[in-house]
Amino acid sequence: MLTFNYFIKKASTPILVGLGVTIAALTGRQLVKKFPQIAKNVQNPFSYIKSSPVVMHKQYMGGFEQKVDKKEALLILGLRPNGLNRNKIKDAHRKVMVANHPDLNGSPYIASKINEAKECLEKTVRS
C-alpha cells in the first residue's frame, strides 16, 4: 500500500529539480526584461571573437564558378599565390579533403570542386 510518506520520499527529487529549473528560467526571463543589454549578449554569444587576438581565418562565403579558375582554386584550398609548389598544394588538398570527404558525410559536389581546384593549381605550377 502506497502511503503519502512513501510518495514524498520517492518523488521529492524530481519535484525539487523541476522547481529549481522553473525558478531559474523565470529569474532569467525577468533579468532579460529588466536589462536589455543582457539580451543583446545572449543573442550573439560569440561576438567577443571578433575582438579576440586569436582570430580564425575567414572562410570563403561565395558560391562556386562553373569552372574553377586559379583565384577560386586558391580560395578553396586556402593558399596564397606566392610561393606555390606541389607539396603545399598536396598538403592543403589533403587537409580540405579530410574535412569534406564524401565517405565521411561530406558533399560529393564540394569534393569534386576541391579536386578540380587541386588540378587547376597543379597545372599552373607545371607551366
Image: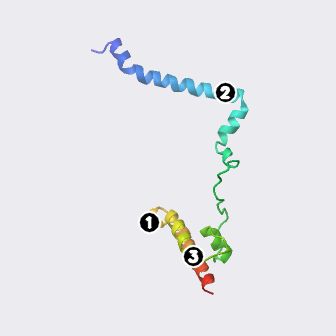
State the mark number for residue 120.
none
Query: Which amino acid, by three-letter code, is at mark 1?
Result: Asp
- Name the residue carrying label 1: 103
Residue lying furthest left in this view? 1
- Name the residue carrying label 3: 118
Q: For residue 54, say whether it is visible.
A: yes
Mark 2 falls on what kind of element? helix
Q: Earlier in the sequence, mark 2 or mark 3?
A: 2
For the point 53% across and 70% down, the residue is: 91
- Residue 10, horizontal then vertical, whole percent: 35, 20
Classed neighbour count for the residue bearing mark 2: other residues with Cα under 10 Å, few (<14), some (14–19), many (≥20): few
For the point 38% across and 15% down, the residue is: 8
Classed neighbour count for the residue bearing mark 1: other residues with Cα under 10 Å, few (<14), some (14–19), many (≥20): few
Tell me if label 2 and label 3 are in contact, CB under 8 Å.
Answer: no
Give 48 or 52, whichever is nearer the viewer: 52
Alpha carbons under labels 2 and 3: distance apart: 53 Å
Q: Quadrant of residue 93?
A: bottom right
State the mark number for residue 31.
2
Query: Which amino acid, by three-letter code, is at mark 2?
Result: Leu
- Residue 66, horizontal then vertical, whole percent: 64, 75
Which is more foreground, mark 1 or mark 3?
A: 3
Task: State whether residue 50 is above or below residue 107.
Answer: above
Where the N terminus falls, by quadrant?
top left
Residue 114 appears left or right of 82 = left
